[in-house]
Amino acid sequence: QVQLVESGGGLVQPGGSLRLSCAASGSIFSITSMGWYRQAPGKQRELVASITPTSRTNYIDSVKGRFTISRDNAKNTLYLQMNSLKPEDTAVYYCTRGTMRGTTYLPGSWGQGTQVTVSS
């Protein structure tokens, strides 16, 4: 059973930055696609960014140029660097392990989530 533990959330002012981390258990991290989802109050959960084992990345339009997903296979850790944060980025962010079906990322295992609040 893969365990995913997120950290790094918190309260930040608009325009600020945060870096989320996700520590993954298990020995297959380096050959697994990973992704970050978020869910804002009253909204559906959405895929923010994904990364393949070869570090090919994909982002939703609203975070392109502001967020960067990356991975450190030696540390079994996934990251999400978030810059120029906006109030609409406020959400619970979830780390996921999944698979690629063509160009579509499909989540499998989920972390418990970490709250990101962007407010002045």
Image: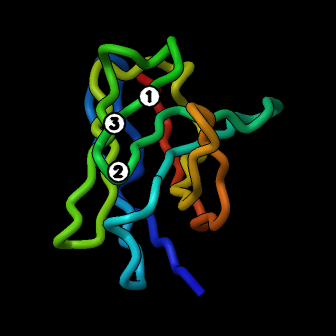
Q: Is residue 71 above or below residue 102?
A: below
Identify the amino acid type marked 2: Leu
Mark positioned earlier in the residue sequence (1 or 2): 2
Taking the image as shown, residue 76 lies to the left or right of residue 116, namely left
**Which residue is farthest front?**
102
Of circles 1 and 2, the one toward us is: 1
The x, y position of residue 66, in whole percent, is: 31, 19
Give SS at disc 1: strand
Name which quarter of the figure residue 86 lies in: top left
Is the Cβ of the residue at disc 2 closer than 8 Å to that at disc 3?
no
Taking the image as shown, residue 86 lies to the left or right of residue 99, namely left
Distance from Cα at disc 1 to Cα at disc 2: 17 Å
* Of the pair 13 and 34, the residue shown nearer to us: 34
Quadrant, the C terminus: top left
Which residue appears at 44% of the width and 62% of the height?
32
Classed neighbour count for the residue bearing mark 3: other residues with Cα under 10 Å, few (<14), some (14–19), many (≥20)? few
Classed neighbour count for the residue bearing mark 2: other residues with Cα under 10 Å, few (<14), some (14–19), many (≥20)? many
The x, y position of residue 38, in whole percent, is: 61, 40
Give SS at disc 2: strand
Which residue appears at 49% of the width and 72% of the height?
4
Residue with the mark numbered 3? 56
Residue with the mark numbered 2? 20
Which residue appears at 55% of the width and 57% of the height?
96
The x, y position of residue 78, in whole percent, is: 33, 57
Residue with the mark numbered 1? 58
Identify the amino acid type marked 1: Asn
Q: Is residue 3 above or below residue 89?
A: below
* Of the pair 90 and 6, the residue shown nearer to us: 6
Identify the amino acid type marked 3: Arg
